[in-house]
Amino acid sequence: MGPTPEKLPNPPALTVFPFSLFMRLLPGQDVRATAPQRESFRRFADLGDPLADDLVAMIQRLPTGQGRAMFETAVEQGVDAVPDPPEELVAFFASVDDQPYWLDHDKLELAARVTMRTGVVGIGLALPGLALTGGYLASKADKPLVGTGDLQRMAPRRLNETATWYIDVTSPGGLDRFADGFTGTLRVRLMHALVRAAMNRREDWDYDNWDAPVNQVQLAGTLMLFSLANLAGCQAMGMRFSDRERDAVFHFWRYVGLLMGVHPELVPTSEADTWRLFWLEADTEFEPDEDSFLLAQALHADRDEGWATELGRAYLSSYSRLILGKTNADRLGLVDNKGLQAAVLATSALNRALEYRRLLPGMTWLSEELGQRARKGLVSRGLMETGGDRSYGRHDQLAATG
């Protein structure tokens, strides 16, 4: 064997506070990649999701509505319930119905309970404030979102649809074959493929600068936001997680990654893998531009919805500013409200003190149940107010070839 390849320097995105501090304290090891590793990673930027892309081709080939109806039958009842199913449908469901040998159902159950415990902190702060807002720093992944046009209307709707899916997936039994989390994940995967097909038909799609639309690098990045970013976002607000709980959460999202169509070579198997993925995403994807600003503004800007709603949005922006840092927050146009930033820090300190309640018998279970009730209530109201659609059926028009 030759000499070990030299590791690359940290990308600019990870040299500014607080990411510079996070990278020193949180991974527990040097997660920088070598040049050959980055090159291997980058080849996935030209790859979509072949099985789901074949489904879109099937839908385009069949009479309007027929392919989607077959897909829905297979989602809800299994592919055997579809008379004479096309080979594309059979191949897709053979893949998602195949449970990997490493799948541990006890870990899935524990991860769901842990996520329930994050309650409003997870669904109301970490998901929108770190995972989604931080995700906007990856400007190449922003292009399909900006292409929808009406960002002020669509941003809250997308947030509530994503949050609803997230709750379905992370509720106990949510990944059972016919549970809402499992079936919802398959619909999200098809939606991604429909968007990918539509973007590929655009004459102005800039493959040289934007890579393939909704590619594997971006799908893996999305998976990372729901695992690593969500845990880190909750930790920043004072929550604590044991090593056993963390291991279960990353195992959980490893399985979800396969269901989402992330290439097996890209799906992290552990927290250490996810930190390595984060480094590569930061190195190759974190290049905010004007679209990053527009999307952040659509999510965080005032909308004259009443003082309580606007206060909550300003609190969320202050959380995002603290956890993303001044440089990134300024790029995204997040307000600099020192008073609300102090309130976020005070809330974090209070949560950290309250976490000691878990030492009392039954308090962990109670925290999980109360957290589940709180996050379900918050998101169900939001979905109703924004007109969200759990079927993502509005994307079916993207299958048109015209």
Image (spheres, rainbow, N blue to C red):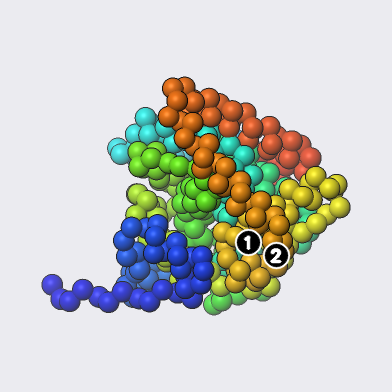
The image shows residue 42, relative to residue 258, as above or below, that is below
Q: Earlier in the sequence, mark 1 or mark 2?
A: 1
As drawn, is 180 to the left or to the right of 12?
A: right
| Residue 93 image point, x, y percent | 46, 39
Please tell me which residue is depicted at 34% across the width and 69% down the height of the picture: 33
Q: Which residue is mark 1?
A: 321
Q: Quadrant of the N terminus?
A: bottom left
Q: Nearer the viewer, residue 11 or 224?
A: 11
Specify whether residue 222 is in view.
yes
* Mark 1 surroundings within 10 Å by alpha-carbon count, few (fewer than 14), some (14 through 19), many (20 or more): many
User: In the rendering, which numbered label is found on residue 336?
Assistant: 2
Distance from disc 1 to disc 2, alpha carbons, whole Å, reads: 7 Å
Q: Nearer the viewer, residue 30 or 280?
A: 30
Disc 1 and disc 2 in contact, CB within 8 angstroms: yes
| Residue type at the position of mark 1 | Arg
Please tell me which residue is depicted at 79% across the width and 46% down the height of the picture: 309
* Mark 2 surroundings within 10 Å by alpha-carbon count, few (fewer than 14), some (14 through 19), many (20 or more): some
| Residue 329 image point, x, y percent | 63, 66
| Residue 357 image point, x, y percent | 49, 31
